[in-house]
Amino acid sequence: MFTKNRLWVIMLIVFMVMLAAAGCTAANQEPPKEDAGQQGQEPAVKEVILATTTSTTDSGLLDVLKPEFDKQTGYDLTIVSVGSGAAIAMGEKGEADALLVHSPKDEKRIEAAGVAVNRQIVMHNDFVLVGPSEDPAGVRGKAVAEALKAIAEKQALFLSRGDESGTHKKELGIWEKAGITPAGEWYQETGTGMGDTLNVAAEKKGYTLTDRGTYLALKENLGLEILVEGDPDLLNVYHVMQVNPEKFDKVNAAGGQAFVEFMVSPEIQQIIKNFGVDKFGSPLFFPDAGKEE
Amino acid sequence: MESVWQGIREAVRLLVTGDPEVLRITLLTLKVSGMATLISLSMGIPLGALLALGRFPGRRFLMSLVNTGMGMPPVVAGLWVTLLMWRYGPLGFFHLMYTPAAIVIAQVVIAAPIITGISAAAFQQVNGRLRLQILALGASKLQTLLLLLREVRLPLLAAVMAGFGGVISEVGASMMVGGNVLGRTRVLTTATVMEVNKGHYDMAIALSVILMVLAYGVTLVLTILQQRGSRI
């Protein structure tokens, strides 16, 4: 009886020690020290926080670019993927070093407020209006403002991001242009990212506005079709910018600048151009560095 | 239904081939949640004993706080830890945001009240006369505590299971303070959410299967320990 008891205690101690050992390794991992000084340069602060939109990560683009950036510069890029609205809010609090977003109106606002500097165009793709193939509101091939009008008239289900992301802002802009304030049972806000919203739209057979990249990445599971595309109102432009180090003393100024330069460099622009071609048959983003808006 | 099968097949493939990315995510999940459970235990058991056995003003109020904390929603814990640890937050100078340490802290906030609450309940269950008897036999305070600890070891294992189960399955706090950074703070739950967003259902199902196997495995070991202990 006594030995059984002792066995029990020993096993408990072993479990505790295992947990402790595991914990210590976790704590040791904090300072990321791999690939330090690859290019013979050791940045003072290694962490660069990039606040960006869900579309750049959900499409897989940043998974390709992060290792490249870390290798080229010796920095360690921390990608925080939120909506453009939240990303810009992080910039406004000085909680990020660089922003990669697609909400031009808000970008200009924070640029004017001195929050963002060195803002440069990186790439574009376009938004598309997707919906069930039956197309209950008959919007196929219309201009996008007309299409939204038709949806509102028919009170066909429309799913909105509702999260102040770049896509949401774009959608609201088009409603405004159509002269409609969307409200009612047929207009539902998901309050989540693009992938989630597309899933909800597919499940409920509703319409939604999406960036082409996320739609292409998810297409096979959705059963939603592109109904409106190619309208100049649907252009989706991504800019990269630094958070102003003069305004926020804790911002990694050199790291933010390095990321902006990295994104507009010819080599990276080439990677962006080819990204997704092998998987989807067409590029997800079109490089724009150096062009006028 | 087909995608579910595909997902389960994918899960088996990932586990059998030992995909390095999945392995890393799995290990990190175990480390972070294990560490958080351990810290919560070291805080929760003494605090639980104090709440159950001590007699001091404000004890009932503290007890009610702990009991409320047992239902702490992970996103609430995540939000407050985020506010504290942001660069310009009061603890910003530690530079812990988006590190595994940040997730551990947030998970401690979630697990500590659970473990404290269950420990307190366990200590209170002990027959009061036993304590009197131990004291009457001339045991010191520390000896008394150790003897009582032996009495409550089985319910304490339940506390470990509840605490560990709570933190390994939470996603809100890990996402908020960890940021789901590839290779650094991506844990099983946040990776699952991300794969769903990407539309990679097979991968998401695979990760969820691994998570469930992991949670079940740990709980199984603890349950065996507990049941063996109850036979003595």
Image (spheres, coloured by chain):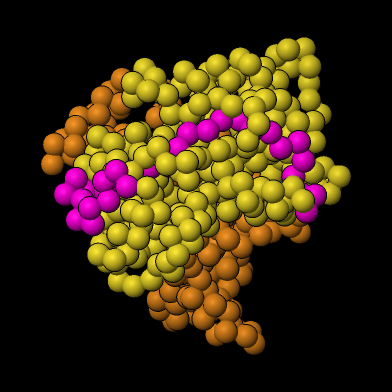
In this structure image, what is the colour of chain A? yellow
Q: Is residue A187 magenta?
A: no
Left or right? Give the position of A173 relative to A51. Answer: left
A21 over A262 or under it: above or below: below
Depth check, front residue: B27 or A199: A199
Depth check, front residue: B150 or B12: B12
Residue B104 visible at all: no
Give the image location of residue A25, x and y in percent.
Answer: 58, 34
**Residue at horizontal 48%, vertical 45%?**
A233
Tell which residue pokes out farthest to the left in this image.
B1
Give the image location of residue A227, x and y in percent.
Answer: 29, 43
Q: Which residues are magenta?
A: A113-142
Left or right? Give the position of B226 relative to B61. Answer: left
Give the image location of residue A239, x and y in percent.
Answer: 62, 37
A208 over A264 or under it: above or below: below
Which image quadrant: the C terminus of chain B?
A: bottom left
Letter of the orange chain: B
Depth check, front residue: B181 or A137: A137
